[in-house]
Image: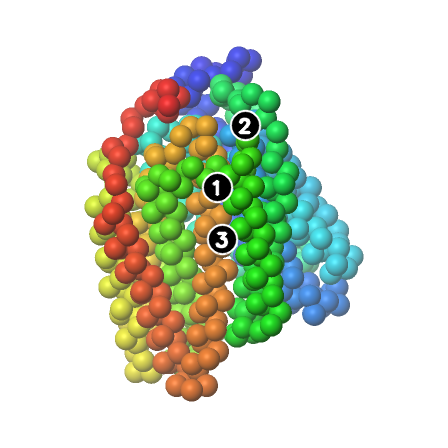
């Protein structure tokens, strides 16, 4: 069927042209959201100097990450009800408009406010984009698409710091945000023009769960602020504990509301499925472990091996490329064999070996040894991480596919915040006592422990053969 046709399409009726053009729009959305999480970091010193807001240095980054984290579950839920096309187009246009506002900001307060708006658009945009691949491809072919999304995200993360520095030193820091305008307009045009109208069954008398949305926001925001404070200070203080306590109170209240809500934002029954629960847990643990490697490997090179900052930053390029290449290849392999559990076990086992190699490093280690060890971890995680996304989508009911997929990325963002806080505390407490090399070794040991837990829990991951047709998805 042609996407120009006015009638709604069923999943199994989509032709290759509609799929290819829609997938291109999805990749544009993923690229923009991922790029903006890193491009600002390099330009931030220039931004705070221009706007005289050094005291709000970290707020520009935190505002975006917190807002996008909060928006993910709500965006996933609404995409299940109103369709991916509507939510994806709204998210892209919202994100683009907020980028224009960020580029026009005249003070740090304005910039932080506009970054919140940008993050909300990014969360909705990425929730709808990541779930769209389930509409385009049957489960047996989703692995390739998920691998492609992972590669696009990694590519954006690699380009972000380089592009941010170039724009800040050249045309000016405002172009760090304004660069999103042509890309966003192109993406929104592609969505509105080519994204097919997919047929879906909407729940009767749907009402947005406002109480649940409010409690979720009131729970997530203070917890993320507390974790960010802990990660920056390297220790727990009274303010951080108070924020964590407040967040946990609202989190419990959120769970109570969701159990009783007629149309909950996050249907709690999805977590009764052990495949989804294990896959989401391992998604979070693997993200935290990867963060521990990518965040502290350059620090090890600079402070322990006394390598230049530029060279230590370059180590992340082959590590990122390793992840991108093997995530894509894993997706293709899963599609060919139609199964995933043994591959996930193999990937987790390789990652554990890499983590142990990193934990054994010391002042006499060579940069090449460090690089190869980090690449082993990246290879193992590149194999198992896309598989957990595939397992979640393969096990989720179609009417909860959006919110369930959004939880994958919600877990990744939350795990990144928790990991940064915990690893930062270990580094701050152990370095003065035992030296930086030993403190970093402790960080790598903790990351390895997380990888061991992933391997063990994957042993209990039930495998459902991947469906080969979207007809089965619609029937369910």
Per the image, label 3 sits on a secondary structure element best described as: helix
Residue 249: x, y in percent?
57, 55
Among the 4 quarters of the image, the one containing residue 475: top left
Instruction: Assess disc 2: are there few (<14), some (14-19) or many (≥20) residues with their C-alpha within 10 Å of its C-alpha.
Output: some
Per the image, label 1 sits on a secondary structure element best described as: helix
Instruction: Assess disc 1: are there few (<14), some (14-19) or many (≥20) residues with their C-alpha within 10 Å of its C-alpha.
Output: many
Are the two marked residues, 3 and 2, in contact with CB atoms closer than 8 angstroms? no
How far apart marks 1 and 3 lie (CA) works out to 11 Å
Among the 4 quarters of the image, the one containing residue 122: top right
Q: Circle 1 is placed at which residue position?
A: 406
Residue 40: x, y in percent?
60, 58
Sequence-earlier tag: 2 or 1 = 2
Residue occupying image coordinates x 30% and y 58%: 453
Q: Looking at the rendering, in which quadrant would you find the N terminus?
A: top left
Number of labelled discs?
3
Sequence-earlier tag: 3 or 2 = 2
Q: Which numbered dot is residue 81?
A: 2
How far apart marks 3 and 2 lie (CA) works out to 24 Å
Q: Circle 3 is placed at which residue position?
A: 413
Could you tell me if residue 357 is visible in this image?
yes
Q: Look at the image and name its color scheme.
A: rainbow
Q: Is residue 132 left or right of residue 165?
A: left
Q: Looking at the rendering, in which quadrant would you find the C terminus?
A: top left
Per the image, label 2 sits on a secondary structure element best described as: helix
Name the residue nearer the viewer: 415 or 335.
415
């Amino acid at each position: 069927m042609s996407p120009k046709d006015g009638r709604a399409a069923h999943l199994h009726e989509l032709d290759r042209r509609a799929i290819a053009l829609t997938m291109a729009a999805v990749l544009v959305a993923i690229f923009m959201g991922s790029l903006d999480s890193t491009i600002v970091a390099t330009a931030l010193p220039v931004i705070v100097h221009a706007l005289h807001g050094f005291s709000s240095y970290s707020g520009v980054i935190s505002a975006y990450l917190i807002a996008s984290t909060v928006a993910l579950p709500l965006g996933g839920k609404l995409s299940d009800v109103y369709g991916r096309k509507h939510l994806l187009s709204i998210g892209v246009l919202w994100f683009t408009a907020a980028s224009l506002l960020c580029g026009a900001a005249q003070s740090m307060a304005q910039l932080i406010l506009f970054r919140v708006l940008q993050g909300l658009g990014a969360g909705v945009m990425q929730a709808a984009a990541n779930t769209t691949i389930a509409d385009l491809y049957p489960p047996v072919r989703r692995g390739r698409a998920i691998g492609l999304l992972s590669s696009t995200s990694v590519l954006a993360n690699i380009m972000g710091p380089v592009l941010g520095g170039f724009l800040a030193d050249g045309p000016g820091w405002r172009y760090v945000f304004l660069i999103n305008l042509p890309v966003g307009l192109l993406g929104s045009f592609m969505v509105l023009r080519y994204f097919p109208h997919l047929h879906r069954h909407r729940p009767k008398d749907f009402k947005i769960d406002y109480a649940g949305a409010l409690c979720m926001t009131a729970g997530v925001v203070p917890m993320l602020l507390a974790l960010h404070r802990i990660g920056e200070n390297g220790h727990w203080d009274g303010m951080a504990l108070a924020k964590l306590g407040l967040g946990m109170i609202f989190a419990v209240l959120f769970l109570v509301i969701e159990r009783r809500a007629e149309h909950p934002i996050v249907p709690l029954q999805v977590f009764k499925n052990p495949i989804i629960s294990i896959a989401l847990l391992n998604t979070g643990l693997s993200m935290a472990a990867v963060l521990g490697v990518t965040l502290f490997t350059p620090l090890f090179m600079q402070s322990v091996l006394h390598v230049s900052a530029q060279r230590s930053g370059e180590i992340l390029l082959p590590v990122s490329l390793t992840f991108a290449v093997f995530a894509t290849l894993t997706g293709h392999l899963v599609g060919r064999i139609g199964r995933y559990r043994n591959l996930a076990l193999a990937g987790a086992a390789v990652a554990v070996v890499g983590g142990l190699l990193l934990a054994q490093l010391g002042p006499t280690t060579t940069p090449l040894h460090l690089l190869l060890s980090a690449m082993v971890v990246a290879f193992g995680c590149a194999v198992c991480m896309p598989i957990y996304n595939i397992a979640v989508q393969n096990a989720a009911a179609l009417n909860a596919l959006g919110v369930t997929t959004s939880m994958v990325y919600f877990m990744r963002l939350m795990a990144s915040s928790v990991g940064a806080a915990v690893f930062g505390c270990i580094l701050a407490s152990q370095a003065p006592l035992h030296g930086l090399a030993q403190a970093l070794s402790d960080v790598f040991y903790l990351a390895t422990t997380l990888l061991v837990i992933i391997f063990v829990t994957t042993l209990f991951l039930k495998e459902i053969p991947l469906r080969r047709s979207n007809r089965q998805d619609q029937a369910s």
